[in-house]
Image (spheres, rainbow, N blue to C red):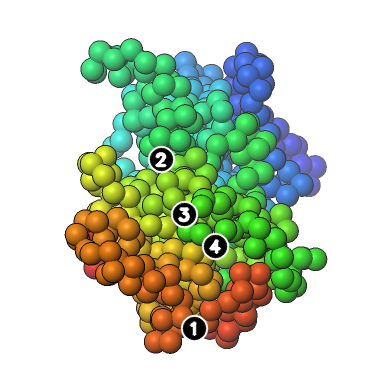
Amino acid sequence: MAENLGRWEAILTEHERRRAFAASMDGTDRLAKQHAAGKLDTRQRAAALFDDGIFTEIGAFAAVLSEGGDTPAPADGLIAGFGHVDGRPVLAGIEDFTVLAGSIGDAGADKRYRLAQLAAQEKLPLIFMLEGAGHRLTNSHAGRSPNDLQALAELSGQVPMLSLVMGASAGHGALTAMLSDFVVMTEAAAMFAAGPPLVKGAIGEVVTKEELGGPDVHVATSGVAHNRVADDQAAIALARRYLSYFPSNAWGRAAVQAGPDACPRRIEEMLTLVDPDPRIPFAMRGVLERLVDNDSLLEIQPQFGKALITALARIGGHSVAILANDPSVGAGAIDANAADKAVHFLDVANAFHLPVIFLTDNPGVMAGSAAEKSGALRRAARMFVAQHRLRVPKIHVTLRKAFGFGSSIMAMNPFDGQTLSLAFPAITLGAMPAVSGGEAAKLDPATRARIAAEQAGGAYHLADKMAFDDVIDPRDLRNALLQGLAMMAARMELPCGPAKVGGVTP
């Protein structure tokens, strides 16, 4: 017996020594630089993500045999594991920039695939925290198949996938973000297919990492990333909040979180927030903040495609996805960027069974030569197809105006699967605005006046034909939405699964 214990003691001592190496990251120098830059190190990031800082590591001994070699790589530069976020199990992969610049080794690549495989098998959300240089040049890639990007593509729509970019992320790592549902960048982040040295060598362009792919580029201009935050802690807090609106997978539904503000209430301020004259702009965000449950509004991509607001929220405790035109930006006209972000947002909502609320106030698809060159028409067609393919409950509300295709892409088409279709009383509808359309068609003044009058009476004309289910007092908007959510309650209790989409996307 004592002899057995002695042998085990030596084995376990070696085991703990190797585990300590796996957890060591990269000693002190690079770790100190990470902290000096205001960033959390990899294990601090994992602790901040999971409840009580507790997680179970997967693949800790990957590359453990590199200890003592020329390029030691604790955990092969990727911390992988699972823990709980608000009590629900979640998987995460966290690149370690202190180990060989967070580059992806062969063992790390296998670990990434293992995470995607587990997410599919156990039906768990998957979060990546990215700060790395992409694949290592020293990798063998000896017949390695399948790879993690294939696995992530197959995983899409089955579980929520998030990427938090917390530093420079190049090549393969950045592609991980592109395959995610939600991408957050810190102020210290950058993403690119190839970093500044490779860009200089390939095309001779001299550019900083910020100019090449910082948050000003990808959050505000390209739309590649969704939201920007100050630092690591804010990114992790946002990821935890984002997950709270979703089920763990496409076989479930988001939990109802009824707080103190989940009850019906009239919004008396609506009459001062929204002018009945469709030519007078108003800030839609003020309406949304009063419409939804208190402190539940989370805007997605607020710096991109600003004429359209895409937001997650709770109404009566129910998670919902909201698309709302913002008349304070170009009168709410849908441009290419707005349509692009809407398509992705609608696809995510459809995948995870969130009811979609459309708040419509726009003069149509953006017109003009710049809009045509940007492909606004095709992007708008994609948005139309995305909303038509929705198999989740949808509620449409016309607030003041809706012209041409701008009404169709905001789900105003009658009898197109809406659970409820509503309008404010003083709305203006038509193929195009009477003034500009009348001039273009060279109509006489009497005809223009008749068309203008018909457009101004649109709510009752269409309600008379059941194109709207009801015409409501603007102050009753929240209560009407609660009634719509109550109507869909039985449907939302039915068994569900991943969305099946067919056809060719425009």
Residue 155 seen: no
N-term-proximal mark, 2 vs 3:
2
Identify the amino acid type marked 3.
Answer: Arg
At mark 1, the secondary structure is loop
Asked if marks 1 and 3 touch (Cβ < 8 Å), the reply is no
Asked if marks 4 and 1 touch (Cβ < 8 Å), the reply is no
Q: Quadrant of the C terminus?
A: bottom left
Q: Quadrant of residue 317?
A: bottom right
Q: Nearer the viewer, mark 4 or mark 1?
A: 4
In the depicted view, which residue is nearer to us: 434 or 491? 434
Q: Nearer the viewer, mark 1 or mark 3?
A: 3
How many discs appear?
4
Q: Which residue is mark 3?
A: 279
Count neighbours of disc 3 (C-alpha within 10 A) and say few if under 14, some if 14 to 19, many if 20 or more.
few
> Looking at the rendered structure, which numbered label has been put on residue 469?
1
> Looking at the rendered structure, which numbered label has been put on residue 276?
4
Cα–Cα span, label 4 and label 3: 9 Å
State the residue at coordinates (19%, 59%).
Answer: 442
Identify the amino acid type marked 4.
Answer: Pro
N-term-proximal mark, 1 vs 3:
3
